[in-house]
Image (tube, rainbow, N blue to C red):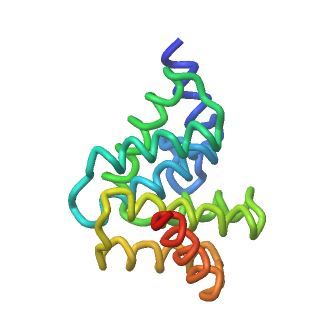
Amino acid sequence: MIESLQRLLRGVVTNDDVPDREAPTLALSVAALLFEVARADYHLDDSEVLLLRELLQRRFALEDAELEELMHLARQEAESAVDHYRFVSLVKEHCDYEQRCELVRMMWSLSLADGERHHLEEHRIRRLSELLHVSHPDFIRAKLRVQEEGTR
């Protein structure tokens, strides 16, 4: 069961450039990018992990065991990845512009979950936003929207 779940979450297509490594799924790509933002300040707060779990559950409607496996795999990917190309390219391939803007909004929510604004998290979101081809005005709108929601 665990092996089939891992295949489901990782996908079954291999990357031609790295023959022994499986290509990530959209869920794993999104989760890894979100983990990357959460750990950008070198501290993974419990509130960030809880929000990340909630965001992934809402976005992908996973069962508890699937969600736990996704969280585990995403953490491993975020900690071992040397770049974000595999994740970003998959998101760009499967998500339209509005969905990519929503992902940037999720990144902002995650970065502010611990109640702190950290320049390293903001920098990471900015870079990922650029890689996702989200315009700077939409990057700012997402940030302001999340900050406004947090003050209510």
Going 46% across and 67% down the picture, which residue do you hit? 151
Report x, y in % for residue 27: 60, 44
Residue 91 in the image: above or below residue 130: above
Residue 70 in the image: above or below residue 134: above
Report x, y in % for residue 56: 55, 42
Label tally:
0
Report x, y in % for residue 46: 28, 44
Nearer the observer, 109 or 68: 109
Specify the quadrant of the image occupied by residue 82.
Answer: bottom left
Report x, y in % for residue 16: 60, 52
Nearer the observer, 64 or 66: 64
Going 52% across and 46% down the picture, which residue do you hit? 19
Tell me: 113 left or right of 128. left
Q: Name the residue at the bottom extreme.
A: 137
Specify the quadrant of the image occupied by residue 145.
Answer: bottom right
Going 38% across and 57% down the picture, which residue do you hit? 113
Going 58% across and 80% down the picture, which residue do you hit? 139
Q: Name the residue at the left extreme.
A: 42
Nearer the observer, 68 or 53: 53
Residue 10 in the image: above or below residue 33: above
Tell me: 11 left or right of 110. right
Q: Name the residue at the top extreme.
A: 1
